[in-house]
Amino acid sequence: MSFTSVQFALFFPAVFLFYWLLPHRLRWAVLLCADAFFYWAGGQPGLCWALGAAALCSYGAARMLEKSKGRGKRRFWLIVGAGGPAALLLFFKYTGFFLSAFSIGAPSFLFQLALPLGISYYTLQTVSYVVDVYRGGLRAERHFGCYLVYLTFFPLFLSGPIERAGSFLPQLRQKRGFCYEQGLSGAVLVLLGLFQKMAVANNLANFADTAFQNPASVTGMSLLFAALLYTLQIYADFAGYSNMAVGLAKMLGFNLTQNFKQPYFACSMREFWNRWHISLSTWLRDYIYIPLGGSRRGKARRALNLMATFLFSGFWHGAGICFIVWGALHGAYQVLGRWTAPLRQKLWRLVHISEQNAFAKLLKMACVFFLAGFAWLFFRVGSLGPDAAMPASLSTVWYILGKIGAEFSLSFTAAANGLVMLGLTPVYLFRVAFLCVLFLAVEWCGRKCGPDVLILRQKTPVKLGLCYLLVFCAFFMSGAGDSFLYFQF
């Protein structure tokens, strides 16, 4: 059930009313019933055993961790609690990849395993929960129903943010009434998310997909424009989902992790990852990078740790060589960015330009956008489906890059032909340009306090005008498509 569907528009108001009308002691049960219905409506009720197994495994292991005294026993329960859910994820998501990589003969159904809803996200939550209990920073949850609500909370279930148990569970127990200001802030976030997804991401997808589904049928300039559109599309799509998830949770009284902070306005790739998918990047830092040694063991070891962390990130996103290369690129960006920082500082001093200068910041932002966009090309090709004219492989990426390089031109005719081949006629070009400018303007103006806070701070006429504009764009200028990109990961 997608947040943009009619079914969800009927489902959430019912949950909202029951949640706030019933006594506090019953609210966890309301959420658990809502989560169960949300999962059932997703069309995979037969795979609920995977979720149940992960929940029981991590819940039971965390309880045993608290009771165990010896180091060996505690490590055993850590491996059981974190390794059990991780093994399920590996089985469902990567069995086909490993079998094909090693040319192992196997029944065809193993290559086409249905991925249980939300498994990539609730697996990370179970791992973080068990590790936090092992480290002593969190008490094991006694109430299994509340723990299930934490794992299956429907706004977060399909694509995060990846919430920590130490933050979520105390809010679930907190006795509180409905807060109008918090509810209004959540509603504005939902509205922003609808605009980002339905108006911006869906419209951009209509044209970017034309090129990526059949690269041979368009020009190199079309592929270049498609890559630029996809760079904006994936951000608008995922940020739209995250804003809706956080907004819906706010309307139910929960304050969750902010997942995006205008990442394309970052001035370095290191800052980019402090702004992009924040809940994942902090999870990778706390449970992969720091346990590997972080930056405590010298520059060479730090570089290896960074590469290992981002390779894990790439592999977590998808079982394919393109996702691994995407992760390796971002790891290389981090390593090279740190190694070249002193040299870049000297170059800025040589040209007598302050790094805080507006021109310097714009140049840095342009570099971040280019580097992220180049990496997104591998990500996009890696997620090509069976209906695409070319396979989801590195050869397709090299073909696209070669065609862009061979047919690149600064002439107006080449650019116009490239846009028309994507379907961007003058009318559609004006529409997409308007939506992108509005999208980026809202992002830029809200870069310090957040777009939702920016809107709520305005006087009532301006506030209402902005909300009506977002509603108009979301529902009257929306593109085709309902599913979010990150549902497949």
Image: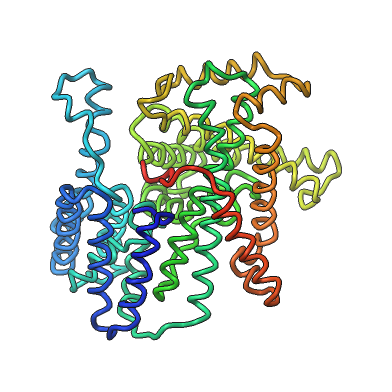
Q: Colour scheme used in the picture? A: rainbow
Relative to 449, residue 43 above or below: above
Relative to 274, residue 342 above or below: above
User: Percent position (x, y) of residue 137?
Assistant: 32, 68
Q: At x 83% / y 45%, what residue is drawn?
A: 353
User: Percent position (x, y) of residue 165?
Assistant: 32, 66
Q: At x 69% / y 47%, what residue is drawn?
A: 434
User: Percent position (x, y) of residue 411?
Assistant: 78, 21
Q: At x 63% / y 45%, what residue is drawn?
A: 268
Q: At x 50% / y 63%, what residue is drawn?
A: 190
Count of marks placed on residues? 0
Q: Quadrant of the C terminus?
A: top left
Q: Quadrant of residue 203?
A: top right
Instruction: Give left or right: position of 385 versus 276.
Output: left
- Residue that lies at the very extreme toward the top in this rendered image: 406
Q: Quadrant of residue 408?
A: top right
**243 or 275, which is in the foreground?**
243
User: Percent position (x, y) of residue 230?
Assistant: 55, 37
**223 or 86, which is in the foreground?**
223
